């Protein structure tokens, strides 16, 4: 078997193995709702690929990268779609932090006129992107000024996500709790004296549209990395074939 044919065979085998690893990593990420678990499983179970040489190393790196980048939205997708929504009032939802999705048992609205915004960098580093977080009270139809607010609609970056204010103006009977690692960004925006242990931050929109956006990000990551892998591999194989042919011609002339 020629050197080029051997390279093609290795590339095909590694691509198939990497695809299987991606499938496994995606399944673990979705079921566990954990990016670390999915990426870790991919890297640990994919270690034998390194024995395949350079292609195996690149294949393992590509699979791990795809599961990591794609897992960012996929873990959130699993968190939201992992169970059925629970029927609760706003106060009950705020008091049950283990509930990720809820169907409201009372009419509610977002009071966008009382929205509060803050701009900051997450790690205080110059290279970190600045985020413009915003929250607005979610109140029942019977709410009166001066009464406590226990649920706030959150917007991760209002400077670029104009859809937040659009969503806040639309009625909804479903709540999706924001990820726990984002909740800290919004705590400083609630009124002074608020019991933070009895407050919930939510995505104010029907879960379907939020989930669709997450799934679109996953598909985009899959497409970009998959096509990059195939394109790079094809270019390397073409370069190897050209080099081998030139070498054979040189040997014939000699």
Image (cartoon, rainbow, N blue to C red):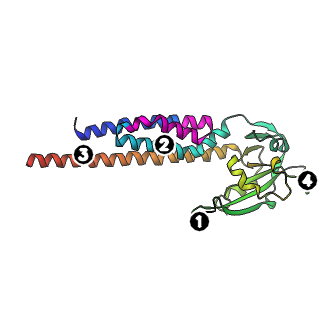
The circle drawn on residue 126 is 1
Q: Which residue is drawn at 40% across and 36% down?
A: 49
Q: In which quarter of the image is residue 52?
A: top left
Task: Determine whether, in the image, residue 83 is placed left or right of residue 231.
Answer: right
Label 2 – label 3 distance at C-alpha: 28 Å
Give the mark nearest the N terminus, 2 or 3.
2
Label 4 – label 1 distance at C-alpha: 40 Å
Q: Do the residues labelled 4 and 1 touch (CB within 8 Å)?
A: no
Q: How crowded is mark 3: few (under 14 residues within 10 Å), some or many (20 or more)?
A: some
Give the mark nearest the N terminus, 2 or 4.
2
Front position among marks 1 and 2 = 1
* The residue positioned farthest toward the bottom in the image shown: 126
Quadrant of image for the N terminus: top left
172 in the magenta segment: no
Q: In this view, does 127 lie above or below 22?
A: below
Look at mark 2 in the image and give the residue it sits on: 64
Local SS, label 1: loop
The circle drawn on residue 241 is 3
Q: Position of residue 67 (x, y in %)?
A: 52, 42
The circle drawn on residue 147 is 4
Label 1 – label 2 distance at C-alpha: 28 Å
Label 3 – label 4 distance at C-alpha: 75 Å
The residue lying toward the viewer, choosing from 246 and 170, is 246
49 in the magenta segment: yes
Q: Which residue is drawn at 23% across and 48% down?
A: 242
């Amino acid at each position: 078997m020629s050197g080029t044919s051997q390279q093609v065979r290795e590339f095909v085998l590694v691509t198939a193995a990497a695809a299987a690893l991606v499938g496994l990593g995606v399944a673990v990420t979705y079921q566990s709702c954990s990016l670390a678990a999915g990426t870790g499983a991919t890297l640990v179970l994919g270690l034998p690929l390194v024995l395949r040489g350079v292609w195996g190393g690149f294949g393992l790196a590509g699979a791990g990268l795809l599961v990591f980048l794609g897992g960012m939205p996929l873990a959130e997708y699993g968190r939201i779609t992992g169970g059925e929504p629970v029927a609760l009032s706003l106060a009950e939802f705020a008091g049950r932090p283990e509930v990720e999705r809820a169907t409201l048992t009372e009419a509610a609205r977002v009071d966008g006129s009382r929205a509060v915004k803050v701009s900051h960098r997450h790690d205080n580093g110059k290279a970190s992107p600045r985020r413009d977080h915003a929250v607005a009270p979610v109140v029942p139809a019977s709410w009166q000024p001066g009464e406590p607010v226990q649920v706030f609609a959150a917007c991760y970056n209002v400077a670029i996500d104009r859809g937040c204010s659009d969503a806040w103006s639309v009625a909804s009977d479903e709540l999706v709790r924001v990820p726990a690692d984002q909740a800290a960004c919004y705590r400083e925006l609630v009124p002074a004296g608020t019991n933070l242990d009895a407050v919930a931050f939510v995505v104010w929109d029907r879960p379907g549209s939020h989930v669709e956006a997450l799934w679109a990000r996953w598909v985009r990551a899959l497409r970009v990395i998959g096509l990059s892998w195939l394109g790079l591999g094809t270019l390397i194989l073409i370069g190897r074939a050209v080099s081998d042919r030139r070498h054979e011609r040189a040997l014939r002339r000699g």
